[in-house]
Image (cartoon, helix red, strand yellow):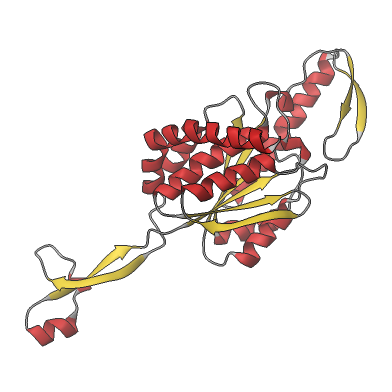
Amino acid sequence: MNIQDIVKKVKQIEIRTRKKTEASLMGQYHSAFKGQGMTFSEVRQYQFGDDTRRMDWNKTARFREPFVKVMEEERELTMMLVVDVSASMDYGTRTQLKREYVAEICASLGFSAAGNNDKIGLILYADKVLKVVPPQKGRKHVLSIISNILSADYVPAKSNLDVAFNYMMSVFKRKSLVFLFSDFEDEFDQKILNVTARKHQVLGLRVFDEKDMEIPDIGYALFRDAETGQQVWANTSSARWRYDFAEQQKRKMRQTKEEFENSSAHFLDIKTSDDYSKFLYQYFKK
């Protein structure tokens, strides 16, 4: 993608996602993530129904009438978008590439966060952490994040989720909302996921193309692993081969989902032809 194509794509994504976000996701996002706690706002005179545990006894004694401390919610949160940019994510057979679909979901999440004055950051990783965009607020920052996802070099290397999580744990000390995008074709260390999910609120989003799960009958075909370069011939006319391939993929994804849920993290399976807003809306609602 050249610069002109990226700018055009970013504008298209902004137009599509902002309308969708404002219509459905932003309110549910605000309800779901209400902040990290309470902070002092002001002292005012007691009103009927106020919580007596909030009484300011020093001021009450000084003025000989009741005063209460007013607390307000700490709304500001940090959202981290952690995106797998290994070569298998630069792939798609129907509506769009996985990378474009991920960029669109990140835009919706980013605009939801920006609308609530939250910070949004980005980590791009493959076999190592390749780029970090520090968390900032605002629409322009969200557009910059979309551009980074679209323009990244999707590298021919196995994705290493462990390095992304280790980076998160070493750099981001305060609890963050972590949205992790990958096709989860590669293994990861359950222990590192456990530690990360205890500190941060983690949602894994497996973004997949329908051909990731089922191979059609196209006769003898040469398949090449986009990440390792390994090649293998297969007889796709064999119903048994196609069945075994599909079952192997299903088992792998069930195992990944179980590992996330056992770590108190959350997990969503989203196909590139799905309406992702429905999945996110239900996640926020839960």
Question: For residue 88, which quarter of the picture?
Answer: top right
Question: For residue 285, which quarter of the picture?
Answer: top left
Looking at the image, residue 167 sits to the left or right of residue 50; the answer is right
The residue closer to the viewer here, 247 or 169, is 169
In this rendering, the answer to whether 264 lies above or below 15 is below
> Residue drawn 68% across and 50% down?
124
Question: For residue 59, which quarter of the picture?
Answer: bottom left
Looking at the image, residue 277 sits to the left or right of residue 51; the answer is right
> Residue drawn 51% across and 62% down?
175
In this rendering, the answer to whether 285 lies above or below 138 is above
Picture coordinates of residue 229, whole percent (x, y): 89, 37
The residue closer to the viewer here, 195 or 45, is 45
Q: Quadrant of the C terminus?
A: top left
> Residue drawn 10% across and 76% down?
66
Q: Residue furthest front?
A: 4
Picture coordinates of residue 8, whole percent (x, y): 59, 33
> Residue drawn 71% across and 44% down?
152
Any part of residue 164 in sight = yes
Looking at the image, residue 151 sits to the left or right of residue 215; the answer is left
The residue closer to the viewer here, 36 or 188, is 36
Picture coordinates of residue 266, whole percent (x, y): 55, 45
Q: Quadrant of the N terminus?
A: top right
The residue closer to the viewer here, 115 or 261, is 115
Picture coordinates of residue 164, whole percent (x, y): 69, 55
Q: Residue furthest left?
A: 64
